[in-house]
Image (cartoon, rainbow, N blue to C red):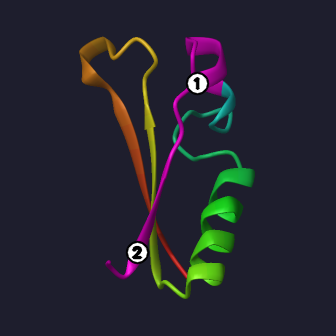
Amino acid sequence: MGDFVIEIKCPMTEETFKTYFDSTMTNPSSKFPTQVMLQMLFLNKGKGFSVWPSPTLKNYTVALRYIQF
């Protein structure tokens, strides 16, 4: 099916969206890469992607992070 996993988070509000990132809003909160890495480990995959669309889809903002195990 592929050599990667995709983790999609769908925050309901802008406030929730902000909690998915560190204070600079450039890096994901530490718990999310850990979730993806566990999925990669369990599924024996070497790559993973985390996707966080903005809840309002303002300007179609989507945060995408590539994670390699």
The kind of secondary structure element at disc 1 is helix
Q: Residues within 10 Å of mark 1 (few under 14, many from 20)?
A: some
| Residue that appears at 65% across and 81% down | 42
Residue corresponding to mark 1: 17
27 left or right of 34? left
Q: Which region of the structure is painted magenta?
A: 1-18
Residue at 57% x, 17% y: name it: 12
Corner quadrant of residue 17: top right
User: Which is closer to the viewer, label 2 or label 1?
Assistant: 2
Report x, y in % for residue 14.
56, 13
Extreme-front residue of the structure: 1
Depth check: 60 or 10 in front? 10
- Residue 66: x percent and y percent? 42, 63
Mark linked to residue 37 = none
Question: In the rendered view of the protein, which quadrant contains the C terminus?
Answer: bottom right
Q: Amino acid at mark 2?
A: Phe
Q: Residues within 10 Å of mark 2 (few under 14, many from 20)?
A: some
Mark 2 touches mark 1? (CB < 8 Å): no
Which residue has dot 2 on it?
4
From mark 2 to mark 1, how far is it between C-alphas?
A: 24 Å
Residue 29, picture quadrant:
top right
- The reply to whether the magenta stretch includes residue 7 is yes
Q: In the rendering, at what x and y percent does residue 67 appear? A: 49, 68
Residue drawn where x is 40% and y is 74% of the image = 4
